[in-house]
Every structure is written in C-alpha cells, then in structure tokens.
Amino acid sequence: MSGVLSIFKDGKKIIHNLLKLRKKGGEIYIFDSFNIYPCNLQVRSEEIKKGLKSRILYKNMYSLQFIRQICKKFKKKMIIYPFHLKTNLKRNNKNIIYGWTEFLSKKKIVTSGLSLIQRLFWIKIY
C-alpha cells in the first residue's frame, strides 16, 4: 500500500482488512507519511481557485504509535523503515496539494500546500 492510507478516515479498519486478506505467512508493506508523535491528524482543507468552485480535500496522518497499537491488538509484528528522499521534488503550482521538498534547518523535508511536514516511512507488518 503506497501513500493511500492517509486518504482513509478509519486507518484501523483498513489495516484490519489488509490483515484478513493477507495469505498465511505473508507480509504487508505500507508507505506513507506518519506522525512521529502520539497524535493522529485529520485535516480537512478547502482548495480555493480563482473563478472555480472550491475543492474539499482530506488528509489523515496516523501516528506510528497508532500503527503499533493495531499490530499489538492483532498480535502482529512490525518494523519501521524511515524513508529519506534523495532527489528534490519541485512544487507543482497547478496543484499545490502534491508534495515537494524544501530545506528546513539544513534538512530536506517534504511538505505540500497543507503546510504539514510529511515524515515518510515504510512499515512492514508480519
């Protein structure tokens, strides 16, 4: 699962369904931005375009602790792999919801028009 967990309001249900669909002995890999602090974020944004209708967007950022709790509940193990982009992503001025890279305190970060710092991780659940 790559970058789509954050579009679902109920991350616990999604991970539970993935575990049910997984073959015995199989592994689940999730790539997304996760909060390193013990808070799940649910962001509702409204993109305003000149002369056009506004567009409502949702972004959820689950905490790593939340994912750990789900794994513990379903008696699964997990490994967290931090992911650091080596390339620079340019801002797409036509769609500022897409992520881009910037430097903050001499470190490369991923952000977007939502002004969130997106810390990217691969999570292996087995």
Image (cartoon, helix red, strand yellow):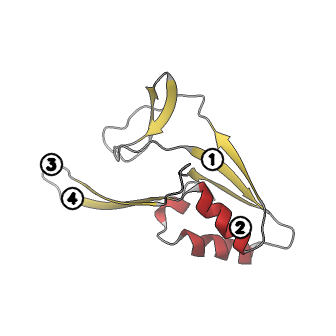
Say which of marks 2 and 4 sits in front.
Answer: 2
Q: Which residue is mark 2?
A: 71
- Report how far apart the C-alphas of labels 3 and 4 lie in the structure: 9 Å
Q: Are marks 2 and 3 in contact (CB under 8 Å)?
A: no
- Identify the residue shown where x is 27% and y is 60%: 55
Of mark 2 and mark 3, the one earlier in the sequence is 3
The amino acid marked with disc number 1 is Phe
**Element type at marker 1?**
strand
Q: Position of residue 116 (x, y in %)?
A: 40, 45
Q: Are marks 3 and 4 in contact (CB under 8 Å)?
A: no
- Report how far apart the C-alphas of labels 3 and 1 lie in the structure: 35 Å
Classify mark 2: residues with Cα within 10 Å, few (<14), some (14-19) or many (20+): some
Indicate which disc residue 50 carries: 3
The amino acid marked with disc number 3 is Lys
Q: Position of residue 124 (x, y in %)?
A: 74, 56
Of mark 2 and mark 1, the one earlier in the sequence is 2
